Image (cartoon, grey):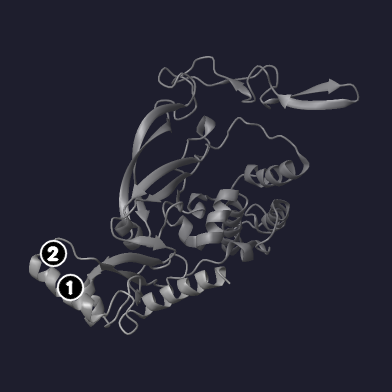
Amino acid sequence: MAKQDYYQILGISKSAQERDIKKAYKKLAMKYHPDRNQGDKTAEEKFKEIKEAYEILINEEKRNAYDQYGHAAFENGQSNSSTYSSFTSSADFSDIFGDVFGDIFGGNRTQRNRKGSDLCYNLEIILEEAVKGTKKEIKIPTLQKCNICYGSGTKTGTKPRLCSICHGKGQIHTRKGFFTVQQSCPKCGGKGSIISHPCNICRGKGRVETYKRLSVSIPPGVDTNDRIRLNNEGEPGINGAQSGDLYVQITVKKHPIFEREENNLYCEVPINFTMAALGGEIEVPTLDGKVKLKIPCETQSGKLFRIRGRGVKSIQNRHQGDLLCRVVVETPVNLNDKQKTLLHELGESFHGFRGEKNSPRSKRFFDGVKRFFDDLTK
């Protein structure tokens, strides 16, 4: 079943600003949140859709990817909705208002549990892989959640103690004349707690440096600067919070034969002047093998031949591009005496290089040159 458009889910236009997205999300989240609709599976599914749409559209990079590729931009990895679990606590309900009102009115939320940063990996592929699609395994340096303390940063059997200054809030209020200023707690750094007995492996950070291997599905039709998003494969969050995303940025290597322009492929095909003059049939390369191309007689160098449907299939609308072959008439080299004699005879039959009948383009050119100099002497 096709997924519904994210903009339609939130009831907003594609030109909606960040504030409009947050307002729409707040309104719908209040209506369909499971804490307000106990036991209503329809409302639960609706809330999952709303939350997924909001998390994509509120993020500028994810929104740009969605606007360009639609739902196909997020086919790698798990979808946002797959991280949903049943709501039995009012904590998630209050988070909705924290996200929306905090961002709109400039409030600061505690940083005790902070989502990990998004990461970018540059992947170079060949043209054939970009056109047909492929799977790649990548190895990336990363910070992973510590397996000993499970991201808490504390030694086994111990727990962080509540900060005595902010009392677990992570923020303190300082009076400045008539105003009260909120800032991060200087003692705990905004975490709300202090680790007295840090984990011996991660030394209280909750994360350790490591490498991980990931399989990336490259869809057919990608091009240089396209990006593929892998959910939750970025930097791990602080204190066990959700990980960021990994963006795989594509670079397509220069091909020895073909050049790509949008969904069309271009190549130059050399032919000898006999073929150009008399016509014939040649084989030209495509990404799927060779095809025959008929060369009509009296073909001029630079003429472009179109072979339909042999280009790149668009990643957006699945339209298949074409292969455009530009023929280049090649001057013969390493001629033997007999070949040179034949060419001399052929040239004499043209009555000079300005032959009106056999070289109309040369005649037009030199006639134009003559008129140009005649005009200068008037």
> As displayed, is residue 169 above or below residue 303?
above
Q: Position of residue 164 (x, y in %)?
A: 67, 16
Q: Position of residue 92 (x, y in %)?
A: 63, 45
Marker count (numbered): 2
Q: Which residue is drawn at the image coordinates 34% and 52% (left, top)?
A: 254
Residue 146 - label: none
Q: Residues within 10 Å of mark 2 (few under 14, many from 20)?
A: few
Tell me whether the residue at label 1 lies in contact with that at label 2, contact meaning CB atoms closer than 8 angstroms: yes
Residue 136 or residue 147, whichever sits in front: 136
Going by the picture, which residue comes out furthest to the bottom?
357
Residue 92 or residue 240, whichever sits in front: 240
> As displayed, is residue 211 above or below residue 33?
above
Q: Secondary structure at mark 2?
A: loop
Name the residue type under label 1: Leu
Residue 335 - label: 2
Q: Which residue is drawn at the image coordinates 41% and 58% (left, top)?
A: 222
Q: Position of residue 129 (x, y in %)?
A: 31, 57
Q: Can residue 11 be seen by looking at this rendering?
A: yes
**The C terminus appears in which quarter of the rendering?**
bottom right
Q: Secondary structure at mark 1?
A: helix
Residue 343 - label: 1
Q: Which residue is drawn at the image coordinates 25% and 66% (left, top)?
A: 330
Q: Determine whether, in the image, residue 322 is placed left or right of residue 332.
A: right
